[in-house]
Each structure stands twice: as structure tokens, then as C-alpha cells.
Amino acid sequence: MKSMEEMIAAAQKAAEQIQTQMNDAQAKLDTIEVEGTAGGGLVKVRATARGRIIGVEIDESLMKPEEKQMVEDLVTAAFNDARDKADRKSAEEMQAIQGGMGLPPGMNIPGLG
């Protein structure tokens, strides 16, 4: 039978491994790119799966003062589309990581999504 000290040491080592894997996962999410669109592609927002915005593209046909409200609405919609795609991609990646650690599906570990 293992001593209490051995069990604590094993638990600490496991926690350190999980933390390392989480840090790696967060770094990976920042390299995966998604694109949100609105207005049939007139407005595009590029973001990382972690949710960091990389760029915004607005078709020049929308660059008219009378189109201001519509452009603002389309930019908002494109941001929301990018955020939704980033959230889905992040969830997929985190599920894959949890599965790789041998954790049961749906097990919620703080910091793991």
C-alpha cells in the first residue's frame, strides 16, 4: 500500500501534467483561425479559436455615409459569427484534450473549459 506522501506526490504530478496540457491547449487555440461573415460576405471578421480578433474586412461597396447603420449591424453580426465559431472550435479542441487525458466525457475540471 502506498503511503500518504506517495499519493500526494502522485496527485501533484498529475495536476502538473494537466496544467501543462492546458497551457499547450490554450496556445494551440490561439493558432487556430476562424472567420465570421455577415451580409453574404460583405463583412468578414477573422479570429482565433481562443476568441482573439485578428482582422476585419468590410467591402468597399458599404463605405457610404447612408450605409453607416447597416455596416455597424453587419460588423456586429460578423463578430458574433466569429465568436460562435471560435467557441465551437475551442470546445472541440478541449474535448479532444480531455479524451487524450483519459478523462470521462463531461468531466468538468476547473480551467478545462
Image (cartoon, rainbow, N blue to C red):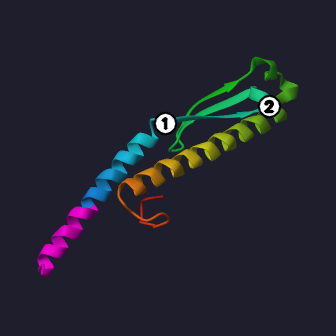
Q: Magenta span: helix, strand or loop, mainly?
A: helix
Q: Is residue 41 left or right of residue 91?
A: right
Percent x, y of residue 31: 45, 35
Q: Tell me where the magenta segment starts and ends, as one range.
A: 1-15
Question: Is label 2 in a helix, a strand or a loop?
Answer: helix
- x%, y% of residue 71? 79, 32
Amino acid at dot 2 = Gly
Relative image position of residue 83 (x, y in whole percent):
62, 44
Q: Which residue is mark 1?
A: 32
Amino acid type at circle 1 is Ile
The stretch drawn in magenta includes residue 6: yes
- Residue 21, image x and y in percent? 33, 51
Query: Which residue is drawn at the image coordinates 12% and 78% (left, top)?
Result: 2
Q: Is residue 111 magenta?
A: no
**Disc 2 target residue:** 39
Instruction: Tell me the residue at 23%/69% (across/down).
Output: 11
Is 54 placed left or right of 7 in the picture?
right
- Mark 1 → mark 2, Cα distance in angstroms: 24 Å
Instruction: Assess disc 2: are there few (<14), some (14-19) or many (≥20) residues with their C-alpha within 10 Å of its C-alpha.
Output: some
Residue nearest the observer in this picture, 105 or 21? 105
- Quadrant (top left, top right, bottom left, bottom right) of the N terminus: bottom left
Question: For residue 110, which numbered disc appears in the image?
Answer: none
Q: Quadrant of residue 82?
A: top right
Q: Earlier in the sequence, mark 1 or mark 2?
A: 1
Nearest to viewer (mark 1 / mark 2): 1
Q: Nearer the viewer, residue 104 or 4?
A: 104
| Residue located farthest toward the top when viewing the structure as drawn | 60
Q: Quadrant of residue 63?
A: top right
